[in-house]
Each structure stands twice: as C-alpha cells, then as structure tokens.
Image (tube, rainbow, N blue to C red):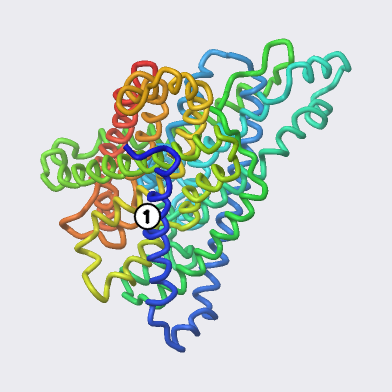
Amino acid sequence: MIRGPVSAYPVLALLALVTLAPLAGLLGGGRLETADLAFWNSAYVWRALRFSLWQATLSTALSLAPAILVARALAHAGDFTGRAFVLRLFAVPLVVPAVVAVMGVVGVYGSQGWLPLGRSLYGLNGILLAHVFFNLPLAVRLLLPLWQSIPAHHWQLGEQLGFDVRQRWRHLEWPALREGLPGVALLVFMLCLTSFAVVLTLGGGPRSTTLEVAIYQSLRFDFDPPRAVILALLQLGLCVLVALATLRWQRLPEVEIDTAPILAGQHRRSRAALPLIMIAALFVALPLAALTLDALRGPALEMLGRPRLWRAAGISLAIGFCAAFVATLAGWLLLRTSADLARRGRAERAGWIETGASVVYVVPPLVLGTGYFVLLSPYVSPFDWVLPLVIGVNALMGLPFVIRCLGPALRQHQARHEWLCQSLGLRGWARWRWIDWPVLRRAFGLSAAMVCVLAMGDLGVIALFGSSDSTTLPLLLYQQLGAYRTDEAAVSAGLLLLLCLALFWLIERVIGGRDA
C-alpha cells in the first residue's frame, strides 16, 4: 500500500496531465488562422457572452433572494411537523439530472402544463425557472447553517434588549449572513454560467445561446474546431475569474451542514414563515410531481420493452459506477496525504493539495471535451473513445464533491485515532478494516453516491461525442425531445429519475451502512 505522505503526488501528477493536456490542445492545436481570430469580434460571440453573463446574474439573484427568506423562515419556524420532509425535498434537486428537471419544468409551465406560460417558456424565462429550481434549494441548505452559527447568548441578549424583527436582522442575522453569502452567490453563479443541458433544451434560439451551447454547436453541427476553441478559451477565462473571486470571498462551512432550527425561546416565529416555506416546497415539488404523472401516463409498457432504452440505461449505469470509483479512489489517496500533513502541522501544504484537486472544477466539461477533440482528432477518432472520455471527465468533475464530503471526516478521524493506531501497531489491511472503514464508510457512501448520480445524468461530453452505439439515457432523452416525442421522453425521464434516486439511496445504504 502507498504510504500516506506520498500517495497524493502521483494522483496530482495524473490530474495535471489529464487537465492540462486538453488545455494545451486548445492553445496549440486549434489551427487558428487570421480569419478565425476575427471571430473574436463577431456579434455572435459577444451576444453569447452577454447572454451567458446576463442569465447567470439573473438566475443567481432570483435564486438567492427567496433562498435567504426561506432559510430564515426555516431557522425561525422551529421544529414544525414536516420540517424534515421539506429539507429532504430540498436535497432532491441536487441529484436530479438537468435534462430530467427540464421535463418537469415543461410539464408545469409548458403550453400543456398546469401553469402554462406557452411559447414564452422557451428562452430566458424557462432557463431562469429551471435554474431557480436547482439553485434555490441548494442555496437554502448552504445558508441555513449561518443562522445556526449565531451564538445562543446573542439571541438571549437580543430578547433582553427588546429587539424587534428589524433590529434582530441588523445586529444578529445580517453580520452572520454577510460572511457566507458571497461564497454561496459565486457558487450559484458558476453553476449557472456553466449550465449546458438547461440552456440547450430551453434556450429557444440563437438569442438565448450561452458560450457552452455555442461550443457544442460549433463542434457538433458546424464542425468548426477553431471557432469552438475560441469559445472554449473565452468560457475558460470567465470560469477562472469567477473561481479566483470565490477563493477570495468563499466562507462555506468546513464541517457537516447543521440544519437544526434555532432553539425555542430565542425568537418569535413570524406569521409568514410557514406559508413561505410551503410555497418554496411547492415550487420544488411541482416539477417532480408533473414529471412522475407524465411518465405514468406515457407509453411506459411499450418503452420498457425496447432494448434501446435498456442499453442506454446500462451505459449510463456503467459510466456512473466507473466515474464514482475513480473519483472516490483518487479523492481518498489525495486526502490521506492532506490529512497526514495537517496532523504534522503542515496545514498550508495540506491545503494546497486539496486546492489542486478542486481546481479541476474551474474547467467546464465542454471545455475539456473540446480540448480532447482538438488533441485527439489528428491521430484517432474521438468518437471511438467516447466512453473513456465521458468517464474521465465526470470523474474529474466529481472529485471536488469527494474532497468536500470525505475531507472533513478523514481529517477528524486522523486527529482522533492516528496516535492510537501507531501505539497499537495497526497498519495496512488490519487498520483499514477495524479503524478506518467503520468511521469513514458513511462519508465514502455519500461521496460515491453523489458522483455516480451526477455522472449518470450528465449531458455534457456525451452530447459532443455520443453515437448510436454509446447513447446514454440523458442523450436518448434529449434526442426524443428534439424529435418531439414528448410522451416517450417522459417515460425515459421517469426511468432516469427513478434510477438516480434509487442508486443514490442504495449506494449510501450499502457503502455507508444502515445509519447512512
């Protein structure tokens, strides 16, 4: 077994290779000519750039504004009946594939939906609705611990001084919220800026095209690699700027999220708290309910008898499991070294290892895919390597989640048990079986489940390189939507949602144990 202090360095070297190689392909292998460079100043590029920034800004604002109100209501509402259900409901969008959520949004707000918006759904309106569906619950779960971080004696002092609602907000809540809000806002902005499946399916035309979709169109439809390179470099530059700002202002918690309510007697429940929570829960639940009903009303028996559907499901499962294994193994090797260095007092060096593992999140999947296309196309057909590419890119994208989920648990475990293991002479398999695994299996289960589900639902690189022999469920669903077979698409979306939710629960239970 590789020793902890050195196990991270081969992994970091491999990460650098698989990340920098496609970027080198973008910079040196795009065969850019003078006519291509003039594309920088074209109206198409600037329109895509403006729309990317505009929709990301609006999506962030529309997600955070109600999220602050809902998080505050959850913090102040106490342990009301249904609170645990609402928090579990807000966790569902984290594992719902984007293309499945789009089907739910169309089912609610489409021309034949429950709250029809007609054709105005396709374009900016639909993109904003889908992004708020994803990011409002995420923001609530990230902001809620900020209220819990306020010391209990601060609330008691506010009660003694007779603070009203406005004074409690100004002197108690806003100072705590101000610390974490910029990091949450930048995270949501980055997710919206790199959104692909939502914009691809709900964009509605050239006026609603982001840089991500423009990259896809340049490679898949126009087959113009030089233009795709220019767009990919522009998207990469934007993501790097947002990432640098995130490193400067991010203040997300380094421990497991605590979503407990404020203790009774430290607040007065607002009359609007419960209605506000119910409205937010309804906003999240409606697309899921609409999708479920559409799937049940569709030609389910006929679709379930088609080999193509099950072949696509099998490929999606293989991608999910392989990506989860690679990302979890790489994350564990990196974190062993990081935790060992932190225990030895080398916290700065340990932090650099984890930052190096998470920096891959700065590079969007489509940028990596474009780089590999340019890098490989002179030698082999990228379409023949679609499954290794999709697995590798999704493992890279899942690695930051592994670092986030497994890192705090491993560092705490090292601090508590390292000296005990050394004094007992426990090493290798014996230590792993009796000490490490029982403590860490829950974090391993959560990490593997998250990466597996995200990889199964990805429509990024597979949309660039997918073919009839490598069609995944998300790609099949997108093809059905493009052919206006919405009843078949509803069944495919229902199957994908069921597989993602079932696998997330199953992996957590099998790996994480009964208490996961």
Where is the C terminus found, in terms of image quarters?
Answer: top left
Q: What is the number of callouts on the image?
A: 1
Residue at the extreme top: 265
| Towards the viewer: 495 or 368 | 368
| Towards the viewer: 367 or 209 | 367
Q: Height in image: 180 above or below 222?
A: above
| Towards the viewer: 432 or 292 | 432
Q: Where does the image place residue 292, in percent across and percent down from the top left?
A: 32, 33
Q: Where does the image place residue 58, in percent across and percent down from the top left?
A: 60, 52
Where is the N terminus found, in terms of image quarters?
Answer: top left
Residue appearing at x 26%, y 43% in the figure: 322
Residue appearing at x 38%, y 82% in the figure: 31
Count residues near mark 1 (Cα–Cα under 10 Å), then give few for <14, some for 14-19, many for 20+. few
Residue appearing at x 62%, y 46% in the figure: 185
Q: Height in image: 306 above or below 369?
A: above
Under tag 1, what secondary structure? Answer: helix
Residue appearing at x 46%, y 28% in the figure: 89
Q: Height in image: 326 above or below 510?
A: below
Q: Is residue 107 visible?
A: no
Q: Height in image: 82 above or below 414?
A: above
| Towards the viewer: 14 or 186 | 14
Residue at the extreme right: 161
**Kind of residue sitting beneath label 1:** Leu
Q: Where does the image place residue 234, in percent across and percent down from the top left?
A: 51, 69
Q: Where does the image place residue 4, in percent across and percent down from the top left?
A: 42, 37
The picture quadrant where one finds residue 364 is: bottom left
Q: Is residue 121 visible?
A: yes
Q: Kindly identify which residue carries mark 1.
A: 14
Q: Tell whether 407 sits left or right of 458.
A: right
